[in-house]
Image (tube, rainbow, N blue to C red):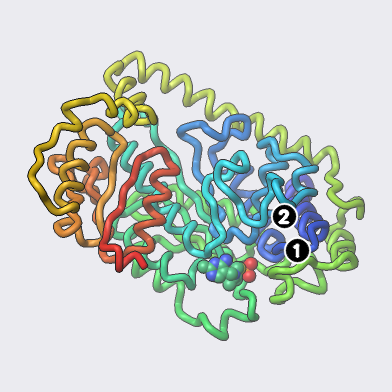
Amino acid sequence: MSTIDNMSVNAIRVLAADAVQKANSGHPGLPLGAAAVAYELWAKEMKHNPANPDWANRDRFILSGGHGSTLLYSLLHLFGYGLTKEDLMQFRQLDSLTPGHPEYRHTRGVEATTGPLGAGMAMAVGMAMAEAHLAAKFNKDGYDVVDHFTYVLGGDGCLMEGISSEAFSLAGTLGLSKLIVLYDSNKISIEGSTDIAFTEDVEGRMKAFGFQTLTVEDGNNLEEIGKAIRAAQAETTKPSFIICKTQIGFGCPAKQGKASAHGEPLGVDNVAAMKENLGWPSTEPFFVPDEVYANYKAISAEKAKDEEAWNKMFAEYCAKYPEMKKAWDDMFNLDIAKDLIDNEEFWAYDEKADATRNLSGIVLNRLKDYVPSLIGGAADLAPSTKTYMKDAGDFSKDNYAGRNLHFGVRELAMAAIGNGMTLHGLRAFVSTFFVFSD
Ligand SMILES: Cc1ncc(C[n+]2csc(CCOP(=O)(O)OP(=O)(O)O)c2C)c(N)n1
């Protein structure tokens, strides 16, 4: 690892430890352990433009282990998403941009609100489904205008939660090859070693779900991490699951590998010891050397070129396919539903009494013709909840253009997948009987 890469990784650790220390609460363990994985991903492998977090074709990144929010905040600060050092100093304070867990639309660059473990995994599946759907609808020969990966990072807790199993089972069935799960495998959760409650063969389970599995033996080795991510990107038929073997609290001698690194400040002395151990040039809180900032700035400037190239391609695409340009605008036009208010044809009805679910089915089937981004389905109950959209096709491994989703009997994942699709710009609905959503 080059010196500058090493320092750039350690900058994430230092900022995360300092933010938690200053707030006197938070979770330093995950950010310290997963800093190298996150750096390699964001600096080398991920397509994103910090100057424009709204770029349509950016890779998506979700921190499913939302308690490790200072990992994400450090990245957003260092890559220049607009989060300042002062914002980091305000971690966990009322009204700050750095709440305890990441919040969508609150902090620029946060793709999804996370915290409830596992939910981010399912939202990522939803985002990958949205990507596949939009790619099927819009891409033309030589113009892959929708072509990005969805990355999600989470730990043992996310993998213990049932919601991730539900979602991954569906992701495998659907062959979502643009989904790349990074498993921060440190074998520690709050109460201690995962051996006390979580001993299954996680890799075997993921294989059974239909994932390609890859292992990074040393979660601090950037080359190894990069190689695994690139192998995941190259897989075109299955989603990928990368087991990153890490050490919770890495870098802090008194805490690394221990459950006490998980969710409490390291302590002033331990933060100082960590900085010394990492060879950090200063013990001043939140200090980051200029050359580290310069490295991040250079990377971000390079990243912006990806969007420039895409913008050029997209302009050509729009000129060549004006009907697709119109379809694109309609797809992401949030006012389209508002326009329905004055549409008499849409609102026409007869007075005949009917069951509410039947009427809902009629409305949904009308809506689908006006709102092209409407997509959704049920947890194996569409014939009962009347949510099937006629002539809209069925979403499957062989037809990502379909608008009827079949979630199987997986209510919790269904809800989070719907969130993920909506966060990606589609308008998702999901359905089951109320009692099953309880
Ligand atoms: C659904 C849900 N249940 C419980 C929690 C509380 N919680 C936060 S972190 C955590 C342990 C997570 O362990 P792991 O994923 O291994 O994270 P690490 O210890 O590596 O930081 C728990 C139980 C939560 N955030 N969400």
Rendering coords of residue 234 (x, y %):
42, 48
Q: Residue reaching furthest top?
A: 319
Query: How many numbered tags mark residues here?
Result: 2
Q: Quadrant of residue 27?
A: bottom right
Q: Which residue is mark 2?
A: 92
State if disc 2 and disc 1 touch (CB < 8 Å). Answer: yes
- As helix, strand or loop, the secondary structure at mark 2 comes to loop
The answer to whether 339 appears left or right of 147 in the picture is left
Residue 262 visible to an observer of this rendering: yes
Q: Amino acid at mark 2?
A: Arg
C-alpha span from label 1 to label 2: 8 Å
Does label 2 point to a residue whose CB lies under 8 Å from ligand 1?
no
Residue placed most toward the observer, 208 or 112: 112
Please identify the quarter of the rendering in which residue 13 is found: bottom right
* Residue on which disc 1 sits: 25
What residue is drawn where x is 13% and y is 43%?
A: 390
